[in-house]
């Protein structure tokens, strides 16, 4: 009988962000090996994505959907943590009745979900808890105490909550719990924070074909800004960067993609600039699968004007895919992205510094492109979904034993009713408040 694997991503709703691609790569590799992989996303999962990836809409609360994410009110952050913990715990109990599963994989976990997972594991009888792998894809917030920028302010709230959740990871039922990140710096950061080993795993984001050498076309390089754009990724800097590159007559074509459907002031400004400039393409839509690959194929230089503190010890899926595809990059200095490959870096988080780095990258583009394609070959030998699953199953081998079951109790039914009532009555208000806070 084939081993059963449960893939969980509470934030998987659309092609925005890296969630769909992570699911696409990992579940496909499990299934390629003849394993049964049942995938579960958020209740609001887009129907087309559910069909394409064979994912079931399930979870009530997305990991990253903090009610007051940007408000400096510690009590509200703790309340949001308690709500997320309760929601994830009850959803795990409900999901398990569709199992049991030999291995549970949880993508992009945050403190509330880690705490809910710990409580869920404690509900099993000794020796009956399943193997579980959890991925830390966000910054922990540590080392940001002196930072005042928007992204750092957001993530600093989680540091005490990580410690609080980590204290629940005790006992024999967590003996087959693998905590991991996709970058050594992030792994070391979380290991120190949680007081337990955190593995650095091979990256899964990898294109479908071998890297190709990027070349100038008509003497120009296509510089691309790709992905789910927001302030922490320097999206607000992009219009000024475009203006400065044009003013300096840097030989570039510009491709700006924003996967976030919100039509904010930056997107409106870029749309107007693209209408007046044939060398600027602005594409405002979620992009997944072949559409995302097309954007990468059109890019000669990927520019990531990201906030340095945010990526000091957390990885970027866009950067990983660029390395895999052999695309040269411009990235912030002192971050995990700088360590991925030979890059051109900027020191200050402002438009002038990023523009200068792009100009240097274009000037030495031929050498950068050759280095990038050579590095991609080495990267692909050590990374990709196949290497990742090899390492995962080496650490958590699928055992020939049946995990335990969890009967439903009256308290579970009451908790579910209360959570459903909360999300039904406050969902609209929460979404409106989060939009204002953004």
Image (tube, rainbow, N blue to C red):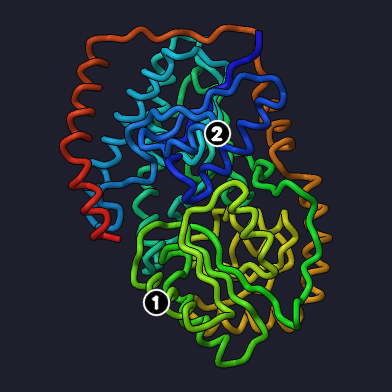
Q: Which residue is mark 2?
A: 53
Q: Which residue is mark 1?
A: 269
Which percent across, then down, holds residue 77?
A: 27, 47
Which percent across, then down, holds residue 203?
A: 66, 45
Q: Residue at position x 25%, y 22% from top? A: 416
Q: Earlier in the sequence, mark 1 or mark 2?
A: 2
Front in this rendered view, residue 145 or 121: 121
244 relative to 421 in the view: left or right: right
Q: Is residue 416 above or below residue 342?
A: above
The image quadrant of residue 254 is: bottom right
Please indicate, yes or no, whether residue 85 appears anywhere in the rendered image: yes
Q: Residue at position x 74%, y 37% from top? A: 387
- Would you say the residues marked 1 and 2 are in contact, meaning their CB atoms lie under 8 Å apart? no
Q: CA distance from mark 1 to mark 2?
A: 35 Å
Which percent across, then down, holds residue 283?
A: 50, 65
Q: Is residue 195 above or below residue 132?
A: below
Q: Quadrant of the N terminus?
A: top right
Q: Residue at position x 70%, y 58% from top? A: 323
């Amino acid at each position: 009988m084939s081993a059963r694997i449960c893939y969980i991503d509470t934030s998987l709703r659309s092609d925005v962000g890296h969630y769909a691609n992570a699911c696409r790569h990992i579940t496909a590799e499990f299934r390629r090996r003849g394993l049964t992989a049942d995938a579960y996303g958020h209740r609001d999962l887009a129907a087309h994505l559910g069909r394409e990836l064979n994912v079931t809409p399930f979870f009530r609360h997305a990991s990253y959907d903090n009610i007051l994410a940007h408000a400096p009110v510690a009590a509200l952050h703790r309340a949001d943590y308690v709500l997320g913990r309760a929601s994830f715990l009850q959803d795990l109990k409900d999901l398990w009745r569709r199992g049991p599963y030999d291995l549970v994989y949880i993508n992009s976990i945050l403190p509330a979900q880690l705490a809910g997972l710990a409580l869920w594991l404690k509900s099993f009888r000794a020796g009956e808890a399943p193997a579980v792998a959890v991925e830390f894809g966000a910054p922990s917030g540590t080392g940001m105490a002196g930072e005042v920028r928007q992204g750092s302010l957001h993530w600093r709230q989680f540091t005490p909550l990580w410690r609080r959740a980590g204290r629940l990871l005790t006992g024999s039922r967590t003996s087959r719990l693998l905590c991991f990140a996709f970058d050594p710096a992030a792994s070391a950061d979380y290991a120190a924070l949680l007081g337990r080993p955190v593995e650095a795993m091979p990256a899964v984001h990898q294109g479908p074909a071998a890297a190709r050498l990027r070349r100038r076309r008509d003497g120009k390089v296509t510089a691309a800004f790709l992905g789910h754009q927001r302030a922490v990724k320097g999206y607000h800097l992009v219009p000024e960067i475009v203006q400065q590159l044009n003013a300096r007559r840097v030989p570039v074509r510009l491709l700006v993609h924003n996967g976030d459907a919100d039509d904010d002031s930056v997107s409106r400004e870029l749309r107007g600039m693209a209408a007046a400039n044939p060398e600027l393409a602005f594409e405002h839509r979620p992009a997944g699968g072949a559409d995302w690959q097309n954007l990468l194929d059109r890019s000669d230089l990927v520019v990531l004007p990201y906030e340095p503190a945010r990526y000091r010890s957390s990885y970027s899926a866009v950067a990983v895919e660029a390395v895999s595809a052999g695309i040269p990059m411009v990235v912030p200095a002192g971050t995990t992205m700088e360590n991925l490959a030979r890059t051109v870096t900027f020191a200050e988080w402002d438009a002038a510094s990023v523009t200068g780095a792009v100009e240097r990258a274009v000037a030495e583009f031929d050498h950068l492109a050759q280095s990038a394609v050579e590095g991609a070959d080495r990267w692909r030998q050590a990374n990709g979904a196949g290497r990742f699953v090899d390492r995962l199953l080496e650490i958590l081998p699928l055992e020939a034993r049946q995990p335990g079951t969890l009967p439903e109790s009256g308290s579970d039914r009451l908790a579910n009713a209360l959570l459903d009532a909360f999300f039904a009555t406050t969902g609209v208000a929460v979404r409106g408040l989060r939009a204002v806070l953004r």
